[in-house]
Amino acid sequence: MKKERIYLYDTTLRDGQQTPGIDFSIEDKKTIAAMLDEFGVDYVEGGYPGANPTDTAFFKRRQTARAKFVAFGMTKRAGVSASNDPGLSALLQSASDAVCFVAKSWDYHVRVALGCTNEENLEGITTSVTAARMAGKEAMVDCEHFFDGYKANPEYALACAAAAYEAGARWVVLCDTNGGTQAGEVAEIVHAVRNVVPGERLGIHAHNDTGQAVAVSLAAIDAGVRQVQGTLNGLGERCGNADLIALIPTLMLKPYWADRFETGIGSHALAGITRLSHTFDDVLNRAPNEQAPYAGASAFATKAGIHASALLKDPATYEHVPPEAVGNRRRLMVSDQGGKSNFIAELERCGVKVAKDDPRLDTLIALVKEREAAGYAYESADASFELLARGLLGAIPLFFNVLSFRCLVERRYDSNGLIKTVSEAIVKVEIDGEMRMSVAEGHGPVNALDIALRKDLGRYQSEIEDLELVDFKVRILNGGTEAITRVLIESQDGTGARWRTVGVSDNIIDASFQALMDSVVYKLMKNREMAGLVAAE
Ligand SMILES: CC(=O)SCCNC(=O)CCNC(=O)[C@H](O)C(C)(C)COP(=O)(O)OP(=O)(O)OC[C@H]1O[C@@H](n2cnc3c(N)ncnc32)[C@H](O)[C@@H]1OP(=O)(O)O
Ligand SMILES: CC(=O)C(=O)O
């Protein structure tokens, strides 16, 4: 059976830009357009030329090599001719391959938001599409509020879709602008629209206000539309748009879709989708969503011993698709939910081999479970786990011995009576039989301790110069005056490697110091490339 083509339309740079807190620079836009182009989507909607200086400048030249570069904007205003509408002119003069017009298709909006007649709105659609085509551009129309409009006045919503189609729009896109339409309703309405516009000219643009944007988009495809609009990581106004990072693998890997449809994305590119998702988060300067379908760090992770045991026998037992297909990886994590299989897999990842019947493995598991009950979280602290395991199963050199540490937080008043809070720390360590004492001031007690600990480690000092703390999280595990505190620290070094360590105590400074110590010791151990050297033989 010949597969039908689904066209992928990305609106990250336009609807994504409408997300609260998102403000792309022109350089961001160029980077993102290039990423999308290389990935293989069919259309990149670059923004709204004429609406702001960034978008106007961005449309001075074509920004994609392969994908069609689309300018977005509204249809001609009522009461002016096409040639006298500055908004329309900006779209037509932009260096785009296509123009996507947003048009009203709900008579209530025509009356309230536009304040013109239904006929004037239809005329605006026809005139705008014709003008874009005459300018040599592919024209398409986003029928705003189409589903709500159809429910209120089906004849008028259909007349808007038909006007766009009859004027020669390549795509008539049905938008669930307020994001409340249910998947079943969308399917029903798409079937009705196909009486006036053929499915191969219809698109869907869904918002995620009920958490169903991907489901709604798939329902529309099932009902006959052949273009789907969405964004990277589901960015978009309010709760976002259909997430292309979830939608594309579903279309390509699930036989229900893949047996009938194809996209312009190859399987090699699909294996880069996790990287695409994370690189995009980097551009936004935000942490990736660990639970994101397909691309999240937890998407193929398990803590559960029963799952890990079966996964090691055959990954298909607990995976709906192979993680490699989307460039992600399987993670069997150690925790109080894990059995021997989780531990053996994690130890192997660290380069430590241990037999399933080695009694030290039972000791390690018991120790991890006991410590987790006390508040440690080893699934989030890979380096602390490795140190614990290597200490128990093999050997870790005693690089240095901390004899004591002290922390002081003092509130001082200067001569003008202004308050200044100062943190000071003193750390005493013994290295090669010699005692060294370091004193440091910091922005807070933990910062002061960190500086003091890393100030003078004798012959190891040069090895930790590139060590950097990149994240510090504190969690109070129980309330009251005897609260237990868990500190998680993320560190990195000049090689770009990152590792996480944990400390737990009823004293936040003590918990922080444990996590700091683990970070430094892990770095020294990593430097020596100890993998294999301390394996439990
Ligand atoms: C569903 C969506 O996401 S659609 C995309 C929404 N995105 C944006 O609005 C972002 C970019 N927008 C902008 O920068 C500005 O709104 C501009 C530059 C487009 C227009 O700015 P202004 O001229 O100051 O108008 P303003 O934003 O106040 O109001 C929008 C106007 O467009 C009109 N309009 C809205 N949709 C349409 C349409 N499809 N066709 C014709 N006119 C329309 C409104 O009736 C309103 O007209 P009015 O000024 O006579 O009341
Ligand atoms: C066009 C658009 O973004 C919408 O209707 O939601």
Image (spheres, grey):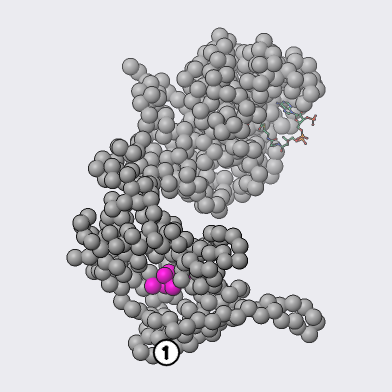
Say which residue appears at 31% left-offset and 55% top-offset: 343
Q: Which residue shows up at 61% across the image and 37% down it? A: 239
Q: Quadrant of residue 142?
A: top right
Image coords of residue 234 (percent x, y): 54, 38
Q: Is residue 416 left or right of residue 485?
A: right
* Front one among 286 and 283: 286
Please tell me whether residue 517 belongs to the stretch shown in magenta.
yes
Q: Position of residue 369 (x, y in %)?
A: 38, 58
Question: Does the image show residue 61?
Answer: yes
Question: In the structure shown, which secondary structural element does the residue marked by tag 1 occupy?
Answer: strand
Q: Which residues are magenta?
A: 516-521
Query: Mark 1: which amino acid?
Result: Met
Instruction: Check disc 1 and report the residue beneath it.
Output: 435
Is there any visible trace of residue 59 in the rendered image?
A: no
Figure check: 238 above or below 7:
below
Q: Is residue 499 magenta?
A: no
